Image (cartoon, grey):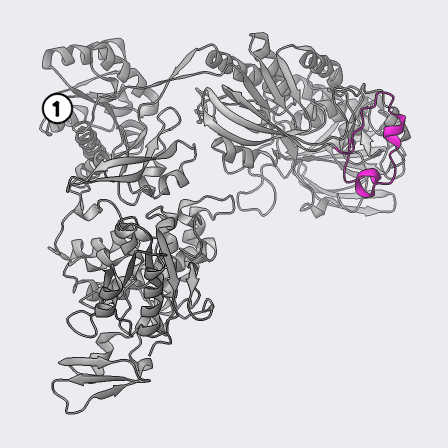
Amino acid sequence: MQKVTREQLLNKASELLSNGTVSCVLGWAAGEFDYDVTPKMFNCVEELNAGFVFNDFCGANVSKYLVARAGKCEGKILVFLKPCDTYSFNQLLTEHRFDREKVYAVGIPCEGMADIAKVKAVCGDGISSIDTTGEDMKVTTLYADAPVSVAAADVLAERCINCKSKKHVAYDELMGEEGDVIDSARFDEVARLEAMSPDERFAFWQNELSRCIRCNACRDACPACTCEKCVFDNPNSGVENKSPANSFEEKLFHIIRAFHVAGRCTDCGECSRVCPQNIPLHLLNRKFIKDINEFYGDYQAGAEVGSRAPLVNYTTEDLEPGEVFDRRDNNA
Amino acid sequence: MQRIGVFVCWCGSNIAGTVDVKAVAEALKNEPGVVFSTDYQYMCSQAGQDMIKEAVKEHNLTGIVVCSCSPRMHEATFRKTAAAAGLNPYMVEIANIREQCSWVHKDMMTGTEKAVILGKAAVAKVNLNTPLTPGESPVTKRALVIGGGIAGIQTALDIADAGFPVDIVEKKPTIGGKMAQLDKTFPTLDCAACILTPKMVDVAQNENIRIFSYSEVTEVSGFVGNFDVTIKKKARYVKEDVCTGCGACLEKCPMKKVPNEFNLGMDNRSAIYIPFAQAVPKVATIDPNACNMLKNGKCGVCAKVCAAGAIDYTQKDEFIQEKYGAIVVATGFNPISMDKFDEFAYSQSKDVITSLEFERLTNAAGPSAGKLLRPSDGKHPHTIVFVQCVGSRCDACAEKGKEYCSKICCMYTAKHAMLTRDKYPDTEVYVFYIDVRTPGKNFDEFYRRAVEEYGVKYIKGMVGKVTPEGDKLKVQASDLIANKQLHIDADLVVLAAAIEPDQSARPLATMLTASMDTNDFFTEAHPKLRPVESPTAGVFLSGACQGPKDIPETVSQAGAAASKVIGLLAKDKLTGNPCVAGSNELMCNGCSSCANVCPYGAISYEEKEFRMPDRTTKVRRVAVVNPAVCQGCGACTVACPSGAMDLKGFANSQIMAEVDAICK
């Protein structure tokens, strides 16, 4: 259960709409099922009352929607940001992707979001409704006689188990208390992969990435992927419009993507959340983040607006390319 | 479709020796776009160039591939040939089948195979080449010389002599550099001050030269012909234009116990000081770390005694912005620290000194007024041991010292030994050496005179250990020729310390984007053919910042650098490099990644209106490259996440075509 309720957010949004602070609201609406919550723009209080939801399945990071939406409505746009969303928000501002003046950001606390795959693992398929208002969520399925009770902690998404920060790094208004950056164990899995032999690691990724169906969901959801024209859609880039025709292409898609967002990825975890094939794509990005931290000192993309990511910055203290290999060899 | 001509050069036997040039020409005939292919002994010769020109006419060529030496050698040559034949010069590509092929392969089969592949890559690139036109930029007719030693002085004098204004930036309070500290100079033994100080006065009196002493360069932007430089004039707490250099303040200053850096700390100076009598500018400077008035507001004696009223305790660092067309680096050298060389007891005994300290000891203006006295007790030394190559010519893996030869030590040690024997014939002088290296006009004669006429004892071998014992220095050494151990009771040990580039060189190189070698010496554009130019256009090298040098060599290099600067400043306009970056604004996000990595500040942003597919308009922030400032380094093209940035002449598509051709 989330500490902040749908009603509280609804009241806040209605208040800001009525007093003219904002003219539209970027929030979440129910999808076909209770668990496939979708980002949605609301233009008036009536629309909000009818469709706005907030529950354990509001994992979607809505900051990316500001790129297309900010400036589209008359006044400001209200956006509800969970702590991890605020990092993407800042990173997009760093890259001048939307006008800060057109946005009213409300920071909301987050208790971690649920992973529907984990819920299904407990309750099986055929979920008809999920009630998240109580301490435990009540899952009703077509096949069970009574609703199944599931503890929220048991179905927490991986990115929330390894939550990096409860701190909002950007907001105009904060609901609830200021949180802290967390010393998470998010790099443990990367370290485990690093410890593998090259062959083992290749087999691991081969196994994961061979499931890719090139649906592009990871790219479309990624808040770092906001190019006017994506290289994968650009016929002149040489890597455009590839279907997973062979194992080389499917791997290269994800590697190119990881390189493209290197130094800019805030580790929000949207790529893995939206992947219909459950590929742990966040591990590729985390490898880059871990390397950057180890080579250039800790850097969190989006922690502040305008920060110079180590990969696009030069200082006389930067390590020499040779040292990168030395460290790699020492780690191996 | 291009109509490409391929011209394979034999380079005599340089290429033809390991590459079957006829087979290469034959193989490339079938590549897409190629309509003509031939080979010739010397493509760069007049006959070879004529062959290219004729082929352009006869076969109506639109592009040219020359398989020859490195493009650094003859790309410009063949571009001119193409231009003479009516082609755009940027339709020429060079396949380097000499340096990167024939010279590294011994086997004809592999050499030929690789030459064909390199040729195919060049053909693939030319297929995508487009004609490029360079822009022009004006030249600021003023030069900046960084460093005011003999190198900087000579360069500045020569540039000023040609009529161009020059600024010298010197970090010390006076110009003169290391040469001002020397006693006599080899091989003619004229006194350093007698030949240097008139030049310093010339600099001061030259209308075209401004001296920024006690100043440092803090920021450099711009490019050849148009550098913008920020110079920090450090507060010297004395008004430079008012001070007459009378020296009254020096005498009255109560703080007299400051180690005198000009004499390498072998005597003391006052807190307000003029480094030496012939300093230029002859203006006092207050040492803020030693002056009581500046530290705690108690004193003010110098202000009271200064008749000119030049003292200003409130002076602040001043930043000067100036534009320059050319920059000469003349940052010079320093002897390395002896801290790591404990075996010579440098830190344990005052009587173990470096050669530069020996210069001060024998200099008439030095701490002992030119009398060779031991620093410890002021007695005349009777046995002196000179140790050469201290920190020079060390193993690459050694933890201390330098791999290179410091070049000047053999000669100055011979000078020291000779002068000592000349002035004090009762002194026994030993010189321990690895080799004695004396290439240079009259150098070997000089060294032989030291041995044959002055009876200096040259011993091949290294000193292993120096141990202070009583008032003697026990020197353990090996004589490699006699194959025996020597034990010498010396009164004075002089270490010929290796020399290294000044500490200021590396940050300066970063500011100038000039390249350095692993020892922090500046790299020249070509070690043989362009020895005084840095690979960064508009940046020139003078003196020991480029490598160890003696005075004659430094002065000739300084003159050479000056002539290159004059050649540049004499031009009204510079033709730019058309291979610059350009942003495809339809793809640009305006994310600033490119501007962040641009070392030249060539990228700015503008809000631009775009028509959208649904007939609405959208204002977006997009990158704009200033082609006059862009140097074509390509950093932006790799930083751009969406591939909007591309380099003309080296487009991503062209590079990929080359890679594809190689991998096919």
Q: Main secondary structure of the magenta part?
A: loop
- Residue B350 sits in quarter: top right
Q: Nearer the viewer, residue A298 or B195?
A: A298
Chain holding disc 1: B
Image-based side of B40 in relation to B452, left or right: left
Tell me if I can see residue B555 in this picture.
yes
Q: Quadrant of the N terminus of chain B?
A: top left
Q: State the extent of the magenta-drawn residues as a range.
A: B286-314
Specify whether residue A171 is painted magenta.
no
Q: Nearer the viewer, residue B175 or B487?
A: B175
Q: Which residue in the protein does label 1 denote?
A: B2
**Which residue lies at the image location 48% right of the left edge and 29% below the top edge?**
B221
Q: Quadrant of the C terminus of chain B?
A: top left
Residue B314 is situated, as x and y percent measured from the top left of the image, at 76, 34
Give the farthest residue toward the front: A19
Image-based side of A93 in relation to B162, left or right: left
Residue B292 is situated, as x and y percent measured from the top left of the image, at 84, 40
